[in-house]
Image (tube, rainbow, N blue to C red):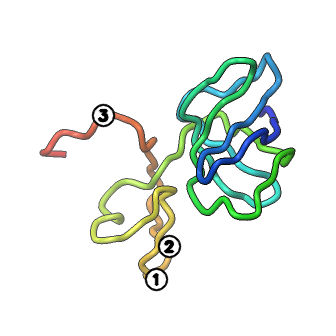
Amino acid sequence: MSNGKITQIIGAVIDVEFPADSVPSIYNALIVTETSLTLEVQQQLGDNVVRAIAMGGSEGLKRGLEVSDTGVPIKVPVGTKTLGRIMNVLGEPIDNAGDIGEEVTWAIHRPAPNYDE
């Protein structure tokens, strides 16, 4: 996938510049290489710059850090093994009950399933 550089940081809002031929799509997950922080693209600002939201603390980030486009949106596990579990927005368990173990994942931005599913 393509790599870009952080150009601006205002709290959890991060602007990243990419090469002209590889600007990420809206909702793509980006990874800050140095910190493994996940960002989600929310807006394409023009001039090859995207605005993203940090899915964790942005402390320690600085302009010029490399960011990789994953080419896919953030996905979380779904299925019966997730029932009763507590996850963060990245689908990582935060309830100290071990790995979820679900093999099926869905993007976090999609239509809601039917009530009977």
Q: Earlier in the sequence, mark 3 or mark 1?
A: 1
Q: Which mark is residue 99?
A: 2
Please tell me in which quadrant of the rendered image residue 81 appears: bottom left
Helix, strand or loop for disc 3: loop
- Where, quadrant-wise, is the N terminus in this rendering? top right
Q: Amino acid at mark 3?
A: Pro
| As drawn, 17 above or below 100 | above
Which residue occupies the foreground of this view, 84 or 68? 68
Residue 111, how many percent across, how many down?
Answer: 30, 34
Q: Is residue 4 left or right of residue 76?
A: right
Local secondary structure at mark 1: loop
The mark closer to the camera, 2 or 3, is: 3
Splitting the image into 4 quarters, where does residue 114 fall? top left
Q: Is residue 19 left or right of residue 29?
A: right
In primary-sequence order, the first of circles 2 and 3 is 2
The location of residue 72, given as percent across then percent down, is 59, 36
Q: Report the amino acid beneath label 1.
A: Asn
In this rendering, the answer to whether 25 lies above or below 28 is: above
* Residue that label 3 marks: 111
The part of the image, by quadrant, that contains residue 69 is top right
Residue topped by disc 1: 96
Residue type, label 2: Asp
Distance from disc 1 to disc 2, alpha carbons, whole Å, reads 9 Å
User: Disc 2 on helix, strand or loop?
Assistant: loop
Residue located farthest toward the left when viewing the structure as drawn: 116
